[in-house]
Amino acid sequence: MAKPRIVVLISGSGSNLQALLDSPDLGGEIVLVASDTPDAGGLARAVDAGVPATSVRLADHPDRRTWEAALQDQVAAVRPDLVVLAGFMKILSGTFVSTWPTVNVHPSLLPAFAGAHAPADALEWGVKVSGVTVHYVDEEVDHGPIIAQRAVPVLDDDTVATLHGRIQQQEHILLPEVVAAICAGRVTRTGRRVTIAPA
Ligand code: GRF
């Protein structure tokens, strides 16, 4: 049987993309990496790995709707089975995220600290434990059903950079594990409850 086809959307350095590219048993094929900016470092990682890479800039379109439609056209053209948001910093509409199963990696234990500054928000709040969440994406930001989480302790001398760095180490393990489980058909979703069957 053909491997599930995966599109990865990025905006930044693409270290999570790299973890997916490096995973020996992902069970799926990354067929396209797309960014909302040509400056995303992750685009070079895709090119190095021989994966088609593209960027679709909001600034090149008259409004968000036509930008998203252009991005959606590029994604649809490669017929994905799964879309992975790996540091993609634009909000996508319910139409987009309900077209394909879509997952996101977020650097906190949701529902705590949704939004673009999760490690800073966790530090400022003073929590002793934060972590990483991989979740299905719905029409609300950082809100969809949680697939998997890993806790990361917050240390007394943490800065935003050191905390985010340790969270990212866990992201690089958890995201490929979840994507592999989805590709293997081991993930079941019932309402907000998601279970992963053993390999
Ligand atoms: C990650 O920390 C992810 O949780 C967040 O954005 C960051 C992306 O990092 N959504 P990278 O581009 O994968 O290095």
Image: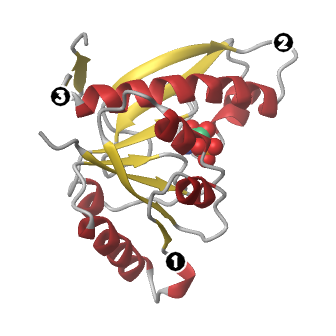
Picture coordinates of residue 107 (x, y %)? 58, 32
* Mark 3 and mark 1: Cα distance apart in space: 34 Å
Give the residue at mark 3: 185
* Side (left or right) of 57 relative to 72: right
* Front position among marks 2 and 3: 3
* Front position among marks 2 and 1: 1
Give the residue at mark 1: 58
Label 2 secondary element: loop
Residue under the point 28% across and 25% down: 181
Which amino acid lies under the numbered mark 1 shown in the image of this protein?
A: Leu
Label 3 secondary element: loop
User: Which disc is residue 156 wearing?
Assistant: 2
Which amino acid lies under the numbered mark 2 shown in the image of this protein?
A: Asp
Nearer to the camera, 124 or 177: 177
Q: Quadrant of ligand 1?
A: top right
State whether residue 182 is above or below residue 78.
above
Quadrant of res 120? top right
* Front position among marks 3 and 1: 3
